[in-house]
Amino acid sequence: MTFEPDYDVCLLLEGTYPFVAGGVSTWLHNLIIALPEIRFTGICILPDLDESRKIKYDLPDNFKDMKTISIHDFDLKQRKKANKKKRLQQIDLLNTFHLKMLEKNYSFFSNILPIFRHSDEAGLTPHDMIYGKEAWNLLLDFYKPEENNESFIDYFWTYRITHLPLFKILSTEVPKAKVYHSISTGYAGLLGVIAKHIHQRPFLLTEHGLYTKERKIEIVHTEWIYTHGSEQARIQKDLGAFQKIWINLFESIGRMTYQNANRIFTLYEGNRQIEISQGADPDKTFVIPNGIDIEKFSRLKPKDLKEDKTEKKSFNVAYIGRIVPIKDIKTFIRACKVVSIHLHNVKFYIMGPVDEDPQYYQECLELVQLLGLQEYIEFTGEIDVVDYYPILDLIVLTSISEAQPLVILEANCTGIPIVASDVGACREMLEGRSEADKELGPSGIVTRVSDPVDTAQGIIKILSDEELRQNMSIVGRKRVESFYRDSDLHNKYLNIYKEFMKKSGSEGQEKY
């Protein structure tokens, strides 16, 4: 059966646009607006269906009928089962898939997908997978009681909490589109693999940050995954057995996403090399840097920032982004303390939404109070940064993981120097990517990760040297004008969509 899809591109989104403001969401919003000839729809994967959650963007006219699903909204009611013979056959298929997966072979996925996409009488239900005897026996085989020293109860609950979201994704209805485009691996990437198999249409993947890497960081630092003993696990060693289950899960999903994507895009070469090391085909991976609306931001500050040449009496320094652990706001706060000892004329702003991780936000407030910085630091909450750029002298990023931060592009375009930790593309954005780019010089200072002293030294160096600030401002403007225009980015994606929309009709018949 052939069909003419209602949409050109179905975006597969996890915890981002349009419910979460930030770099990736803004990038995607601008892309949709810039391509009015493309008919978009989307599926937004959320942790829960919180009715108080608000859409943070004015949705463009060419983005229609978005669907939301909650990975923690489970239906475990017992229903009519498939007959015993069929259940055993399906359990055997699942066992085969897991064995092949241990060998990093995910080609068997198409064999197990129908299990979760048929009526209850024809396939296993989430209830069967949690409470069914056949699934229970399979779980015991995976657990290996004869050699496993970990608690089986803890193992079962880890299985339950890791796999119930997978069962939800596996049964999700995906709208018909000519092309499917995921903005990460993880659950959204898995949904892209499913869409490709079901509808036999091309699947594209764009990674800004590397999902698997960021989940590893979160898992290592989380307190709710049970770890034997009291010492905090490290990312390279001493991981608890249940932390390893979580990490292996996301690594497997990532590899399966890479293997199934028709084309993979990322923001800089370092990311591309990591993707290849995780199973991506080098011939299918490409770098497309972010771009920026130069006209919008360049006019926010005059090009000559020091026309009167008089000594500046005070400075405004800001962190811009979400208040979450991976952004390491605490390092910024500690750096502010060091700066305040040496410079008494600096006001610090922490700009961004505070509701994504309320506990971490509270910890940041307490750290500000502990260090006696209440008069120096202001949390603005979620604001329009365009209103603040004209008064800022320096922007600081202390993230422990980034891809290609949009705020650096905006700061460069506006003529604001930057201090940023050495993660993702930050170094090439501040020091240059190509030889021609590097010849321009630095538009900021790159610092060691999670190092408040090094961060503070970078801040002090820039604020204390007017000529350095002026040079960095000029270089930043030249860099974005030469290498980071958003029109180039949008044209590339328009051509990519058109290429795969043409191929879409030859992908095959709809399945399942």
Image: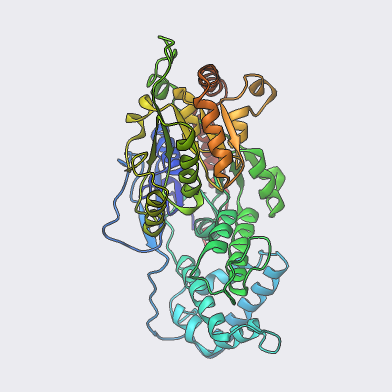
Front residue of 257/277: it is 277
Q: Is residue 417 something that shows in the picture?
A: yes
Residue at 36% in and 24% down: 390
Residue at 49% in and 26% down: 463
Residue at 56% in and 25% down: 443
Front residue of 221/334: it is 334
Q: Is residue 394 left or right of residue 506?
A: left
Q: Is residue 462 left or right of residue 370?
A: right
Above or below residue 114? Residue 470 is: above
Residue at 62% in and 72% down: 240
Above or below residue 268? Residue 218 is: below
Give residue 301's position: percent from left, percent from top.
39, 19
Q: Residue furthest left?
A: 52
Q: How is the image coloured?
A: rainbow
Above or below residue 43? Residue 121 is: below
Give residue 495's position: percent from left, percent from top.
54, 33
Q: Is residue 180 something that shows in the picture?
A: no
Q: Residue furthest top?
A: 308
Give residue 223's position: percent from left, percent from top.
50, 68
Give residue 327's position: percent from left, percent from top.
49, 48
